[in-house]
Image (cartoon, coloured by chain):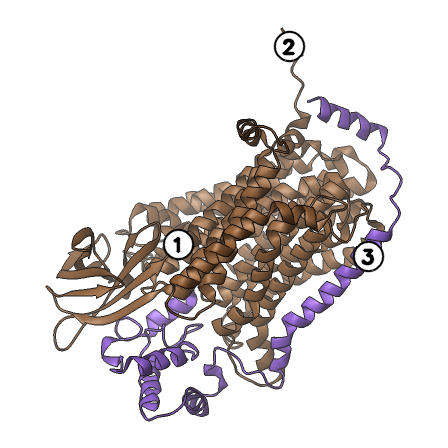
Amino acid sequence: MRRLAILLCLLLMATPGLAVQPDEVLDDPALEARAREISEGLRCLVCRNESIDESNADLARDLRLLVRERVLAGDSNDEVVAYIVDRYGEYVLLKPRTDGANLVLWLAGPLMLIVAGGAGLVFLRRRARAAEPAAATLTDAEQARLREILDD
Amino acid sequence: MITEFGHFALILAFFVALFQAVVPLVGAQRGWPGWMATAAPAAALQFLLTAAAFLALMWAFVSSDFSLRLVVLNSHTAKPLLYKITGVWGNHEGSMLLWVLIVTLFGFFAAWFGGALPPTLRARVLSIQAMIGAAFFGFILFTSNPFLRVPVPPFDGQDLNPLLQDPGLAFHPPFLYLGYVGLSMSYSFAVAALIEGRVDAAWGRWVRPYTLASWMFLTVGIGLGSWWAYYELGWGGFWFWDPVENASFMPWLISAALLHSAVVVEKRETLKSWTILLAIIAFGFSMIGAFITRSGIITSVHAFATDPERGVFLLGILAAFMMLGLTLFAARAGVMQARGVFGLVSRESALIVNNILLAVAAFVVFVGTIWPLIAEMFFDRKLSVGPPFFNLAFTPFMVTLGLILPLGAMLPWKRARVGRVARRLVPALTLALAVGALAFAMQTGRSAVGPVGLFLAAWLVAGSATDLWMRTQSWGQVTERLARLRRLPRADWGKSTAHAGLGVTMAGIAAMTAWQVEDIRVVRPGESYEVAGYTLTLQAVREAEGPNYTATVADLKLARDGRQIATMHPEKRIYPVAGMPTTEAALDNGFLRDVYVALGDPQAGGGWAMRTYYKPLANWIWGGAILMALGGALSLSDRRYRVAAGARRVRAPAVPAE
């Protein structure tokens, strides 16, 4: 069924709870806002497609605490992310990097749009220039059907 | 006994499907009317047999027959009756049976209402539909049989997953399947037309109701799923760009493109080969959806190995039908010549832009969904593609679509002048700009999402209204125009309603993304706190007993300016049989906002963790979805489909007009 991700996460978590716990929240609202922003881009490793900000899993909580620890230690957002990626791999990034093969992923949409747009334009120009075809011819049976429908 | 009867009916249905897949097709090829005529009764028989099998399985669930493996794994005597019934499709085997039931239902529909079709086309359509049916009957019987027994029946079952015991999710799969499987009908029509070598305006008209119905059901299904996620998961998210969600979203996008391009085929006999291709691809995406959901391949390459048999079988079905469709397409696409001639600026070209945007958007979602798999297989990189990617890569297409939609919808066919249409839209544009500017002035942050979203929403709603108003095409009295408005074809009303619905949904998404307020804190009974101008007071936290669960319930008072608005009861439930907890958030729904409260854990120092949200325009997201579906329904009830459907009935004797 749908949302197995969430089911999985719920099964894996030790205690039912909410994503960000009150005791995790930093006192400085500016730092907390940064921590939330960073958390939203990091994946909960044991869940399927949830960020650590949304996840209830214990591991996500550990990562949230780690993020806050680094933020308190004075790291910039990028440094915190780099710190986490060093330890857990690029799998934790919900927004894939724009390097190497990933360029295909990032450019797929724009390139496809150009191709489709070009093809569409060629088609449109050809249609605009085409001669109006002779009136569509219907077979006798179709003519009869047409009359039947129109009379209805 | 009933179980054996159901099992037997299912096997019989499989053979009827095999018969129907071959005999009418041969008949159509050879021109044997007798062979072609077997298609309709076979389709009816197939549906009745499958329905019997489905009812037998439902009976097993309702009567808690624990000699059935499936019932043991997914039911419990203490489960409420509603969820005993919906539990039938709350699992792999049962949901596949529902899937195939809908395949045969659509086949039955096409047989019943297909009287106006040319006999060869009708025989071929029903044959192709039966092939799809046979493939899935085979899948069920050989890999996912719901009627398997257990040697020693236990005293009670293991209960349905508690998350599925919810009205939103209970009815989410049937709607989604009606949508997925409805696209099989478009596919059958496309393939039959390719065999026939003929695609004309009439074909466009026959295929459009099925596409429209599929799109409508998908809209409802996706809406229900997202609504469920919103109130059930405890933090009010409504869309996660999860692979399984994307699996339902891609067919939605493609079917939206298809129902627009079928209009061009119907009205202008152009875009034929593209429409055929879209019809084939749309069903392909439906099956990819089934494949993604069932095989678990996207989650991880390794999960695939847990049930390779099913995954490979489904992949085989997908490959076979796509190869059949695309090979035929390659061989026959040249036969379909475009007839209509139109200028660079015309309704036709606007619909082509619509198709490009929707198709490329679906492509982006597709690439994003399968990219982790490709990266792991070919580049040895384990990575994730999550919401940040999709928000960035997908949203621009929808924004562009929203920008051009009101203009495109009003352009006349063949040749148009932008200036003339644009002038009529000046009031709508002015209104939309004013709404956007107002939103910008009133917000505290610097985010562009809110103002742009509200601008687009107002533009779409006002643009749709303008479209409808201009259709009255009379410069006479207002009352006269209002009277004409009532007499406009339902298709016009449907179009404007659906387009306005898109705007309403956009407003909801934008407002919720931009202006949501979140509050997380520890609250002790008796304490009050403020969120976004509302005062919440936690009165008590108590234990409660449900039919098959125990719950911790908090009682909160919601007040504004000292006036009580509502009492709210967020819950945490534990389902002992399944051993699973769920959160039941409490919502105070409003037209302009929701207040959303979720109860967390008891804290060591006393008190409870409490999450509270203020969610502006939340209900607009689903309200817009309802409008879109309603638009589809209105369009579907238009006279021209009824005329086509009822054409074969015996003519009533003419009544003199006195």
Q: Mark 3 Cα within 10 Å, few/some/many (few <14, many 20+)?
A: few
Q: Answer with mark 1 or mark 2, whichever residue precedes in sequence.
A: 1
Residue A125 is tagged as 3
Q: How far apart are marks 1 and 3 (CA)?
A: 48 Å
Q: Distance between the residues labelled 1 and 2?
A: 51 Å
Looking at the rendered structure, the secondary structure element under dot 1 is helix
Q: What chain does mark 2 sit on?
A: B
Q: Position of residue B558 (x, y in %)?
A: 20, 56
Contact flag, marks 1 and 3 (Cβ < 8 Å): no
Q: Which of B431 and B552 is in front in this view?
A: B431
Q: What chain does mark 1 sit on?
A: B
Looking at the rendered structure, the secondary structure element under dot 3 is helix
Residue B134 appearing in the image: no
Residue B655 is tagged as 2
Of all chains in the rendering, the one displayed in brown is: B
Q: Where is residue B550 in the image (x, y as percent from the top left)?
A: 20, 59
Looking at the rendered structure, the secondary structure element under dot 2 is loop
Identify residue for label 1: B169
